[in-house]
Amino acid sequence: MKFSVFTASTPDWTPAEAVANLAGQGWDGVEWRVIDQEPAPSPGFWQGNRATWPLTGLESDVPEIARLTRDAGLEFSGIGGYARSFERDDVARLLAATAALGAGRVRVTMPLLSTGNYRDLLDATRKDLAWATARALDLGVTVLVELHHETIAASASAAMRIVEDLDPAAVGVIHDLGNLVIEGHEDHRAAFEMLGLYLQHVHVKNVAWQPVSTSADGTVTWAHDWAPLRTGLADVGRYLRTLRDFGYDGWVTLEDFSTAVPLPDRTRDNLTYIRSLLA
């Protein structure tokens, strides 16, 4: 396996700082966050993230993205796009940029469950992905569908309903350990077997559920929050070993959104930790 970091989780660093730090720590690659984000008074994961490339005008940034990444000796594990499957102009822009970079894979996000009837969303998304994968084949890149809570692809089973008739040469699935703690968990080995050739990328983070309030009748309300790899509910070591035993030898991208440890120490320790789990 090869290990990279998704820059959504490195908001304090500029792109140049991100590649310098990650290369210096021994990471194999980087997964760039691409989105038009809102400004913020201070860097944050979702707003004001300094390690983010804007989608608008992405074409003009391609040479600089390529130079920074390759001069640092890093590979592209993929492009972390946020365009929804039905936003075809934005998807086309991401596909073209991914091909120009030689980055191989790009995430296209799935519709939120809250935006419509599930069956209608599923039918529309299958048509959108058929359109996207036809272009991806022409460009020699792969569209990635991430398992993500609150979307129509929260589990491996749900993702298979979306991609099962599409060419795995042009579309794959991101199995995301942390997201599945929130929604969509299935036995990991069974999920890998179910996905088969569509298992083409992996995201690792961890999550914990915490009680946030108790009502007068004693009912406890729980909420999820990001957690360090060691302390969340998911058993990261067992997960990685199951991946290895299944035969997966692709990219594992870390996206740790916990903040208990400063960013440079967090990324450095995460790499040491995940390598130790596979030793």
Image (cartoon, rainbow, N blue to C red):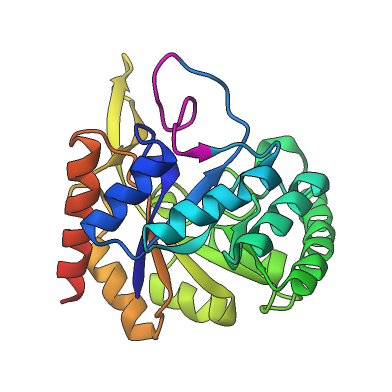
What secondary structure characterizes most of the magenta part? loop
Quadrant assignment, res 127: bottom right
Percent across and percent down for residue 104 are 59, 68
Query: In terms of depth relative to the viewer, which is nearer, 275 or 61?
Result: 61
Q: Quadrant of the N terminus?
A: bottom left
Q: Is residue 136 above or below residue 185?
A: below
- The range drawn in magenta is 41-52
The residue at the point 41 percent across, 27 percent down is 44
Query: In terms of depth relative to the viewer, which is nearer, 74 or 264?
Result: 74
Magenta highlight on residue 95: no
Q: Quadrant of the C terminus?
A: bottom left
Q: Is residue 274 above or below residue 226?
A: below
60 horizontally vs 18: left or right: right
Residue 111 seen in this snapshot: no
The residue at the point 78 percent across, 53 percent down is 92
Residue 132 seen in this snapshot: yes
199 horizontally vs 204: left or right: right
Magenta highlight on residue 49: yes
